[in-house]
Amino acid sequence: MATVADSSFTVEWLLNCLAEKDEEYKKFREQSEVEKVDAADISGGQGFGSNVYRCELTFKNGQIYTVILKVPRSDKVEEEAQHHDENDIAIAHNVHNRECYFYENFASSIQIPLAKVYATREWHGKEDGCLLMENLSGIAKTAKLQDGFGKEEILTIAGYLAKLQAFFLCHSNEEWKEKQKANMFNTVHASRFFVDILDAYEKNSHVEAVSFLRAVLNNQRALDYAMYDHAKETGLPVAFVHGDLWTHNIMWKVDGDGQMTKEVKAILDWQMIHSGSPTFDLARFLAISVDPEIRRKVEIDTLTHFYNTLVSELKNRGKAVDIKLEQIIEAYRVNFVHQSLHIVGLVDFFPDIKEVLEKRADAALEDVQKFKNELPAEVSKVLGAE
């Protein structure tokens, strides 16, 4: 039986999934039969243990329709495992299954822009997992990381994050709070990657901030506090967190000339979902994807917009939650301390735009020191405990 490229998934399976769930495919199918299916791996070797296939369906009337099949592969993991430890392999399985969990249980009901997903399969043992989803190329694109976002785009993202939080705070099923904890990602072991990177910045006028961040990295209590416990202990509700919100995981609609608009088409890659702080995603997005002069100028406006939208959404859903703007601002600063590590860590991954990212990293470390001094003493003490 014919398979999709070199994957374990058959063409018959793919067509059956589309016939069941894809309304666009059904329109094509009403006019003509599928003549052939071609698939090409477009992942370019990126992504531990995964292949991404662009599947092109050619109909007998000459029309062409494409979808994307994302397959984390057991054989590919085994091939690459010599460069990773067992914990990395377990995480590769876990993150795919988290994304399946999100799309299977919640995506169809959330009023935020998402890619259409037609089939999911969890990844267990030797059995490959997958996501079968719409192809957004040609109708949407990601921004360039070096360009940074402006206030309009930032407020748009903040509004969608508030709607995401409101949806889960009002959802009758709260199993995700325990089922999707961040324990696999947020460990001292997983954070070792950042330790050596900080050395260069310690010699570059950021001695105090780097010392503070090293203390966070070496203390499991501080890591848990930054991602989860602080918000909970200060009275904020446990939030559903995307976990990896930055430039490359947001697609924006394009106009007739192929130019990117300011309208979001889809927020992608829900692999790092976890229960945690309501402001985690905002902190990550602003630290990585926004130039510092813009970030600093719009930070409070962004947090205020997020807060007002969240309160309004909760009120519209009939849920009263006692949340204060001051709590949101404090939680953001705690999350920003943690996320500053990630913009620092990204610098060497993008050598062509290193200067831009170094500027964001330097500013983030400056603000770590600023926030450390502005946070309540007991909060800074937990984060910076050796």
Image (spheres, grey):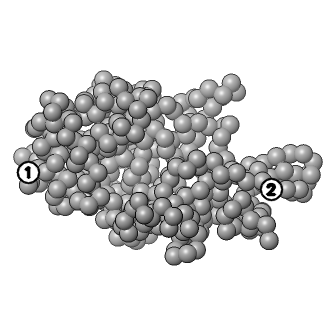
Q: Is residue 266 left or right of residue 26?
A: left
Residue 366, percent from left and from top: 19, 32
* Of the two numbered discs 2 and 1 in the rendering, the one whose residue sits closer to the viewer: 2
What amino acid does circle 1 point to? Lys
Circles 2 and 1 in contact, beta carbons < 8 Å: no
What amino acid does circle 2 point to? Val
Q: Residue drawn at (33%, 60%), measured in percent from left and top?
A: 185
Residue receiving disc 1: 381
Q: Residue drawn at (13%, 44%), measured in percent from left and top?
A: 212
Q: Is residue 44 above or below residue 147?
A: below
Residue 363, percent from left and from top: 25, 30
Q: Looking at the image, how many numbered discs can be counted on the residues?
A: 2
- Pointer 2: residues within 10 angstroms few (<14), some, or many (20+)? many
Asked if residue 87 can be seen in this view, the reply is: yes
Residue 106, percent from left and from top: 52, 61
Camera-nearest residue between 334 and 173: 334
Mark 2 and mark 1 lie on one chain; the one further toward the N terminus is 2
Q: Residue drawn at (59%, 56%), measured in percent from left and top?
A: 51
Quadrant of image for the C terminus: bottom left
- Pointer 1: residues within 10 angstroms few (<14), some, or many (20+)? some
The quarter of the picture where residue 13 lies is: bottom right
Q: Is residue 138 above or below residue 46?
A: above
Asked if residue 113 can be seen in this view, the reply is: no
Measure the C-alpha gap from mark 2 to mark 1. 59 Å
Q: Is residue 291 left or right of residue 65?
A: left
Q: Residue drawn at (25%, 42%), measured in percent from left and top?
A: 197
Camera-nearest residue between 5 and 341: 5
Q: Is residue 170 left or right of residue 255?
A: left
Report helix, strand or loop for mark 1: helix
Give the label on residue 37, or none.
Answer: 2
Residue 131, percent from left and from top: 60, 60
